[in-house]
Amino acid sequence: MDDAVAKTNRVSSQLKAIYKESILPAEKRYRYDFFYESPFLTDVEFDAKPQVMLVGQYSVGKTSFIRYMLGRDFPGARIGPEPTTDRFTCLINGPEERTIPGNALSVHPDLPFRGLERFGVSFLSRFEGSQLPSSVLRSVTLVDTPGILSGEKQRVNRGYDFTKVVAWFAERADLILLLFDAHKLDISDELKSTIDVLKGHEDKIRCILNKADQINRQQLMRVYGALLWSLGKTINSPEVLRVYVGSFWSEPLQNMDNSSTPVAHDLGCTLCTTMPFGNNSIDSSSTPSYSAELFEQEEADLMKDLAILPRQSAVRKINELVKRIRKVKALAYIVGYLKSQMPTVMGKEKKQQKLIQDMPNVFRTIMKKHNLAPGDFPDINKFSEKLKDTKFSEFATLKMEQIQLLEDCLSKSLPKLMEELPSEKDSPETLRAKMGDHAGNSPSLIPVPNRANKFGKANDGTSNPFGFGEEDEDNYWALEESAERLKDSFEALGPVGGFLSPQVAKDVLVKTGLQKDQLRQIWNLSDIDRDGYFDHHEYVVAMFLCDAVIQKGRPIPSELPASVIPPSKRALVKGRGF
């Protein structure tokens, strides 16, 4: 089993124990499931793979994006310019291709969809699972949502509360992709309502301006600004959401202005008038494709966000539980306060009405008395509506023992659990203790698409199994074959976080039998990043230098030839002025 996955499983087991012992009793006592419309957590939800939910209006490319990620079609996929996806579809890994009806999916013992039963048969008939064998789905679950329409009629005809279902998935998602079409930036009422229920999950949201290759660069600049302006009016946050711009499907860029092919210009354009002899045809080999490069970089950034989800899964589980604990604690104080204000015998209904009307002051009083953050409190309007369906006299009294258990979770149990996870402060030794012998080399990444020809580029050495040629000075590495050959011997030395410790690396060099002065020179040349540790590439360089002295009798060079320096480290060498 992958080390990162094993670590996530260990964290999940401890989180389950913390939840059952310290949090669940408080949730039941103060009716968290009723006030927040969020069912109690089950074991399978702690064990679930990371989830990515795609949200957007119809025909923005949600299903095409999923097909691009998977590299293939999936059962039940429907793509077209009209509203085609009329149901929530969860894509899961399995040995055979098939669709699973929503009612069956909601009672599956190994899937975290039991809580969807509360939305009724009307929703479950519009919910399905799409199972297929996929390397991507081994690590993540994708959730495709129906295209958001405009108008009250479509909202009524759904037969279920669309925004509440989105809120349910958002609470459990690790990443929420909010897609927009470059040609349709209007935010309909239902889309605004959907974005509103994502409040509190802003850290998970990534916006995508899709189909940007279908407009020219000037239009793209205006559309991008218009989208940010619209989002600023819709999402009440001082921070600007991250917006990825591009064309997220496998087809080449459509607009010639956004590709690497030759571009025809008018004689009066700025680029032509700055050329000494003028030209109305710019060759692609001498003119950079700014938009294509932008799209490629944007897609790479997004795919990186997606690829590392499995590694971040444990941290996100802890993060979600911390948010839930804070809400439970605030709810306990509110319910306890309302109970304490009720008369013993007469006038209960009148007092209850007065408290509901005075809810802003109630919140303020509790906030100041117990030093709570405003963000931990429920939405005051929704909460007041919920209170009308209850009897305060039947509420549970505040139990300080349970509050203390919640405090202990926040101050002791969860911080202790966080210490077991890898962090930037870890040395290679502590990283090894946390993640096992192969930390740093584990393949716990989602395989994401990488197609150079999509951006108008010819396939380079990255898609050639025989690597780069010597003519490609930026990417050619003379020791590439040696690196492949020495990979097993490097792994056998037990690298920690991908690095050999100074002692292990020293022992390897000493065994070569070279003189101490020679080994000192080899170390200085091989430890390119000057951190005292050898990664795989530095180990290869060191073995190459030792072999050159021992087998071929060559002197140790004063500096490494450019072709021997690993391409990923050449910037370090140039920065030192070599």
Image (tube, grey):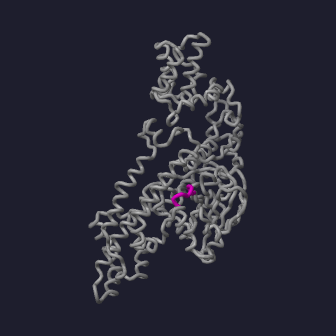
Q: Is residue 47 magenta?
A: yes
Q: Picture quarter containing residue 181?
A: bottom right
- The correct choice, above or below, for 529 with respect to 327 in the image is above
Q: Position of residue 231 (x, y in %)?
A: 51, 60
Question: Which quadrant holds residue 73?
Answer: bottom right
Residue 489 or residue 456, whichever sits in front: 489
Q: Is residue 566 above or below residue 407?
A: above
Residue positioned 48% across, 69% down in the render: 38
Q: Is residue 212 visible?
A: no
The residue segment tinted magenta is 45-51
Give the answer, above or below, for where 7 lies relative to 465: below
Furthest residue toward left: 369
Numbered-mark total: 0
Residue 245 is at least partly visible in this image: yes
The residue at the far bottom in this view is 346
Left/right placement of residue 552 relative to residue 509 reads right
Residue at (32, 70) in percent of width and height: 399
In percent of width and height, residue 235 lies at 48, 62
Magenta stretch containing residue 386, yes or no?
no
Q: Nearer the viewer, residue 276 or 537?
A: 537
- Give x and y (percent) for residue 447: 63, 46
